[in-house]
């Protein structure tokens, strides 16, 4: 039997007390233990210790008794004479992946599922995965198009499909419809449909949207497919609208169909993009993630309606290929952010990777650059950051191979990519431990940064839950400091870390596939993570929060609204107001305090994470600076650590701003809070 605090009792260094032998009779067990900064305890029955032994342990009348208590008098000490390396702005990066509702249903404005008919339309209408059918963003596992008419009136024809492997042929007097569309009263919706007659005789195609005004009718002639545009004005708000496409007179083929809100921004959701502008991330990683190891980037190039739909190679559902490299670059231009593109080193090869780099950065005189120019983008894109692969150490990764084999593959990729464009910066796949060490030993001349990933689960106790993010960041930094000390090939090199996936990951899937919800307690942990990045500024160059929109992201959407998660508020706040020159700062655990000067040295910023349920007045001792005037305080706080924000509803967690006055000898923070102070520095 063991008792531990919120850390796992089997982890090295966990605070635990152990009864070494078992017994059959009931007995009283007393296990005195120091709580330290922990606010939760776990009691576990370990039968046979670390061996697998079957049995049952019964516990009754469990109680906790306080034996002693030390007074906790937290304070803040900042030494402005002790400065660290400048904080990289890239620690506020983001990561979007073709997973769940991140791109489709989150960023991309297309309202229709399976608009290119990847799934065959059959009489057995059951579009959603059983476990997700009741969710507002269910996982689509079969055709979302329902036959209107006789069961055999819609046929999937493989001969000369418009796109993909087949196109639906619809008999006269029949049709197809898609349900569960969301409308906002007064909003205009625009779309189009590609059709052609199935024979020599022309038909008529009608398009209607329930909950909106009007029915559109188009002639459907033989020969080539024709694109017919339509628009609707919603007369009501609903999440149960249906789009129908019916055929009259003679049978017709439907090639593809699209429906978007008219306020879409180059095909992207206006509401989502507005929230992302508030986030103001300096760099976005794309397209994966596990997805990239099975992704053919060429599928996402060219006429959007003719791009083939594919099964998502890593996750559930369909990859529509509506959002490819050109759309990602438009996304970055609209948000005024830098692109960071992951290359497929899983099932992909160096030739395809070189072609992708050439498509993005080559002149119009190169083969791939000429293709880009034909697609409407004459000038090369400015793409500096490229990663060679994703998590190739993992057995779950498509194309996974041994470290020995992968180091050769990485070096092959790097040599070919640098021959194509010597100016690009390459990020290698890392995983602290033997994999990262091996990559650094054998590939240090073929990388500029090395990636690391981590995700944290929920832990009992607010302080333990919050602390684990900062602990994970610090562990990555310490591992790489060790490599720099031990590995001779790293002498004279400065290979920093790109922690290009990091976050909490736990809880039910509310927002589609892997779509978890985040709470105030998670915001505190993310703030602690940012603090640790600033403390490790000499080795942490980039960090990309995963996966921005829906899934495990800091922005969540339903079908009509987007909102900032609690974690997104922290990222938004620190990106906007935290300084760039880190200073030495100390406090008593479990408080997490970090401090930095702004680049001009005129403002001291102090971040305080208070993972306790009591407000605190914190004495401030400041060496090397004098403060004066009126400062600002931004606070993210609440009485409930499980408070959260919901798209389309008044947010329960917000950023509250107020003024603070000199002399700043005491800083006040609320319970369960993240507080950022900006205090003016006296200049001579």
Image: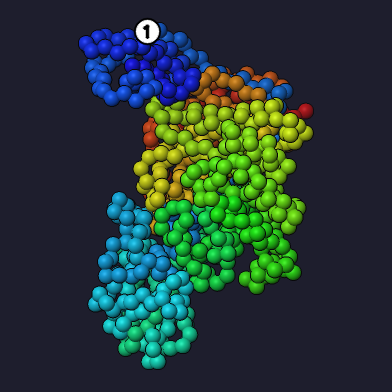
SS class of the residue under badge 1? Answer: loop
Q: Position of residue 156 (x, y in %)?
A: 36, 75
Instruction: Name the one closer to the observer, 565 or 10.
Output: 10
Above-or-below relation of 359 to 449: below
Camera sees residue 336:
no
Q: Residue furthest top?
A: 68
Above-or-below relation of 572 to 641: below
Instruction: Name the one closer to the observer, 224 or 247.
Output: 224
Q: Position of residue 331 (x, y in %)?
A: 58, 58
- Quadrant including the N terminus: top left
Residue on which the image places disc 1: 67
Above-or-below relation of 592 to 379: above
Camera sees residue 301:
yes
Side of 147 where 82 appears, left or right: right
Above-or-below relation of 658 to 207: above
- Quadrant including the C terminus: top right
Q: In terms of image quadrants, where is residue 595?
A: top right
Q: Position of residue 634 (x, y in %)?
A: 54, 35
Q: Position of residue 400 (x, y in %)?
A: 53, 47
Number of callouts in the render? Answer: 1
* Residue drawn where x is 67% and y is 34% of the image: 539
Give the crowd class for mark 1: few <14, some 14-19, many >=20 residues within 10 Å: few
* Residue drawn where x is 62% and y is 41% of the image: 404
* Residue drawn where x is 66% and y is 30% of the image: 483
């Amino acid at each position: 039997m063991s008792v531990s605090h919120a850390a796992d009792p089997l982890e090295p260094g966990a605070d635990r007390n152990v009864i070494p032998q078992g017994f059959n009779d009931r007995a009283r067990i007393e296990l005195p233990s120091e709580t330290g900064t922990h606010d939760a305890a776990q009691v576990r029955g370990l039968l046979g210790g670390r061996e697998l032994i079957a049995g049952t342990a019964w516990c009754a009348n469990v109680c906790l008794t306080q034996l002693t208590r030390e007074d906790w008098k937290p304070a803040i000490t900042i030494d402005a004479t002790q400065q660290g390396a400048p904080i990289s702005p890239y620690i506020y990066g983001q990561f979007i992946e073709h997973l769940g509702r991140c791109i489709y249903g989150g960023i991309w404005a297309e309202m229709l599922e399976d608009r290119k008919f990847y799934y065959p339309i059959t009489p057995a209408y059951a579009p959603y995965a059983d476990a997700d059918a009741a969710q507002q963003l269910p996982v689509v596992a079969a055709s979302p198009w329902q036959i209107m008419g006789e069961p055999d009136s819609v046929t999937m024809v493989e001969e000369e499909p418009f796109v993909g492997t087949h196109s639906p042929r619809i008999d006269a007097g029949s049709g197809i419809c898609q349900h569960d569309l969301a409308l906002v009263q007064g909003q205009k919706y625009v779309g189009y449909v590609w059709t052609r007659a199935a024979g020599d005789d022309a038909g008529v195609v009608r398009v209607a949207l329930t909950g909106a005004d009007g029915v559109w009718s188009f002639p459907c002639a033989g020969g080539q497919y024709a694109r017919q545009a339509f628009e609707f004005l919603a007369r009501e708000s609903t999440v149960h609208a249906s789009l129908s496409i019916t055929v009259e007179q003679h049978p017709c083929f439907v090639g593809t169909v699209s429906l978007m809100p008219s306020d879409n921004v180059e095909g992207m959701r206006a509401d989502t993009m507005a929230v992302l502008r508030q986030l103001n991330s300096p760099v976005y990683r794309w397209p994966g993630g596990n997805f990239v190891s099975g992704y053919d980037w060429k599928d996402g190039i060219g006429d959007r309606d003719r791009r083939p739909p594919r099964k998502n190679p890593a996750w559930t559902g369909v990859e529509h290929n509506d959002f490819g490299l050109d759309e990602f670059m438009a996304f970055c231009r609209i948000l005024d952010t830098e692109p960071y593109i992951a290359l497929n080193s899983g099932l992909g090869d160096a030739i395809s990777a070189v072609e992708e780099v050439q498509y993005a950065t080559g002149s119009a005189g190169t083969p791939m650059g000429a293709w880009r120019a034909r697609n409407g983008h004459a000038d090369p894109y400015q793409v500096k950051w490229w990663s060679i692969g994703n998590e190739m150490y993992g057995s779950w990764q498509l194309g996974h191979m041994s470290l020995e084999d992968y180091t050769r593959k990485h070096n092959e990729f790097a040599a070919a990519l640098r021959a194509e464009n010597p100016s690009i910066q390459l990020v290698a796949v890392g995983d602290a431990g033997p994999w990262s060490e091996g990559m650094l030993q054998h590939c240090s001349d073929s990388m500029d940064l090395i990636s690391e990933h981590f995700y944290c689960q929920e832990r009992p106790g607010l302080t333990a839950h919050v602390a684990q993010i900062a602990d994970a960041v610090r562990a990555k930094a310490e591992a790489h400091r060790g490599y720099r000390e031990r590995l001779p090939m790293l002498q004279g090199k400065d290979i920093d870390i790109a922690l290009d996936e990091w976050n909490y990951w736990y809880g039910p899937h509310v927002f589609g596939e892997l779509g978890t919800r985040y709470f105030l307690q998670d915001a505190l942990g993310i703030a602690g993570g940012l603090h640790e990045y600033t403390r490790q500024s000499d080795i942490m160059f980039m960090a990309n929060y995963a996966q921005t929109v829906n899934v495990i992201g800091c922005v969540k959407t339903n079908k009509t609204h987007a909102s900032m998660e609690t974690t997104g508020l922290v990222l938004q706040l620190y990106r906007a107001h935290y300084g760039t020159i880190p200073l030495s700062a100390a406090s008593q655990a479990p408080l997490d305090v970090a401090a930095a000067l702004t680049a001009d040295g005129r403002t001291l910023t102090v971040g305080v994470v208070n993972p306790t349920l009591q407000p605190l007045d914190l004495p401030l001792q400041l060496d090397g600076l004098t403060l004066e005037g009126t400062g600002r305080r931004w606070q993210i706080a609440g009485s409930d650590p499980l408070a959260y924000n919901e798209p389309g509803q008044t947010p329960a967690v917000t950023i509250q701003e107020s003024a603070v006055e000199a002399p700043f000898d005491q800083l006040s923070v609320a319970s369960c809070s993240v507080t950022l102070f900006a205090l003016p520095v006296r200049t001579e």
